[in-house]
Image (cartoon, grey):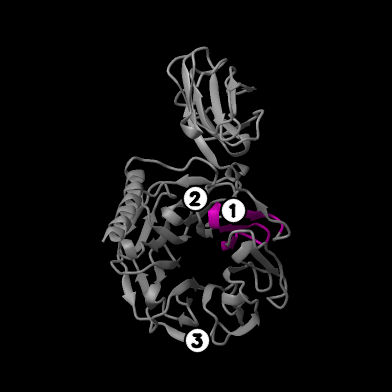
Amino acid sequence: MKKLFQILFIIFIFFTIDLLAQQTGWFWLNPTPHLIDQYSVMFPTTNVGYACGAYASVLKTTDAGSTWVVQRTGYQYTLNTIFFIDENNGWAGGGTYLLLGNQCKIIHTTNGGETWFEQDPTIDGQVFSIFFTSVNNGIAVCESGQILKTTNGGSNWVLVPSGETAQQRSVFFTDANTGYVAAANDILKTTDGGSSWNVVASSLNHIYSIHFPSSTIGYASGRDGSIYKTTDSGLSWTQIYEWSSMNIYSIYFTDNDYGFAAGVFGLIMKTTDGGTNWTYTFDQSEPDNRSIYFTNNNDGCVVGDIGNVYLTSDAGGTWNNIKSSFTDVNFASCFFTDNQTGYAVGAGGSCFKTTDGGETWNTLTTPTTEDLTDVFFTDNSMGYAVGLHNSTMIKTTDAGASWQFLYVPENYGLQSVFFTSSNVGFISGSSNAIFRTTNAGQNWEL
């Protein structure tokens, strides 16, 4: 009984934190884009693109992916897929998990992501892929073989019989009537805009993604590096590639021959001959890549776990990770001297400063490589930071432009610093040690 109470208490705390974050208006500032897993990316135009992921996060770029802005959806559940029919009209789908009822969720925007509102399909399970052929007509595929169809932009979603019970991961249409769904080990096809579906391939290796560069030629990717190809509008499929344990989560072709794929361990693949041969790059220490999209033959984008975003402008010859190096630092404390100017300290003696309310941060140089645990300023210029080892303490009198060591007796791991005036301050650390100064840190007494 006690263990059950502890579990319920932890769950209560977790959801209370999520609720407070939603109600009090907290939103991500740095690093950019952010550290949240991203599961889907697409570009309705060459320059305008969107990505979505965990915690109902949505990112938007207006410069072909060079910079991204975090859009506040107002929701907290996972978003697995995003689709825009033009720059302004878009949908994102996902859902809550079992502890919150396992509810299907679709959100919609008509103003380029400035505001989002829910379109409730009233079914259980996650939405994994959405595709619209016009601003009104769309299909969403879900868990347990469910296919949803709308003819009014998502104001109403109706269930369409699929004959499937397996998880469906991807949907793609080549025109208003002809579309395909990746239904685990099967591929389904419709020729009437999604009103009815028939199995055209079976016994495949759990398909995650499907893409057609033309009306007749299509590709699908799945588990164990499986890639399949059709040349007859999906009537027959041939396996053209396999790589054990290397799941391929997304596939995209810019024409019938040039194609790209993304998957586990930062995997990015490329073919120039319709999938006969592939080149690739991956690193087992890298997080998984989840989605890939190209706006033309040269410019492409990949998104993945922990907020990774990769860009190419040379048809996949090189890929650049645009996530800020700011993300590589673990931070322990921040302090603001006013509503615009603030400081953050953390691992390896790192110290950053913002002068625009946290929108951007610049690196400051400190004289230590010890992990810094706390920072405090007594006015706009004078500040202090303490470290985890060797009684490390540093001080600045010029708003962080330069820092000098202060001497603290003994050898303690310092955890916190606080000043009650410009001269009187306290630091606390290991072994219950508390030090006091009355002369702005020049001397400290235990």
Q: Nearer the viewer, residue 294 or 442?
A: 442
How crowded pointer 1 is (Cα within 10 Å; few <14, some 14-19, many 20+) is rated as many
For badge 3, the amino acid type reads Val
Residue, disc 1: 309
Q: Earlier in the sequence, mark 3 or mark 2?
A: 2
Magenta-colored stretch includes residue 328:
no
Q: Residue at x 43, y 85 (%)?
A: 198
- Disc 2 designates what residue? 59
Instruction: Decide if residue 253 is on the left or right side of residue 112.
Output: right
Q: Nearer the viewer, residue 378 or 204?
A: 378
| Residue 102 position in % (x across, y down) | 33, 66
Report whether residue 245 is seen: yes
Q: Which residue is mark 3?
A: 200
Neighbours of disc 3 within 10 Å: few (<14), some (14-19), many (20+): some
The reply to whether the C-beta atoms of the residues labelled 1 and 3 are less than 8 Å apart is no
Number of numbered discs: 3
- Kind of residue sitting beneath label 1: Val
313 in the magenta segment: yes
Of tags 1 and 3, the one toward the viewer is 1
User: Where does the image place residue 445, in percent across and percent down from the top left?
Assistant: 51, 18
Q: Residues within 10 Å of mark 2 (few under 14, many from 20)?
A: many
Location of residue 439 with respect to 129 vertically, above or below: above
Magenta residues (range):
289-314
Under circle 1, the secondary element is strand
Q: Quadrant of residue 384?
A: top right
* Residue 278 drawn above or below residue 406: below
Q: Secondary structure at mark 2?
A: strand
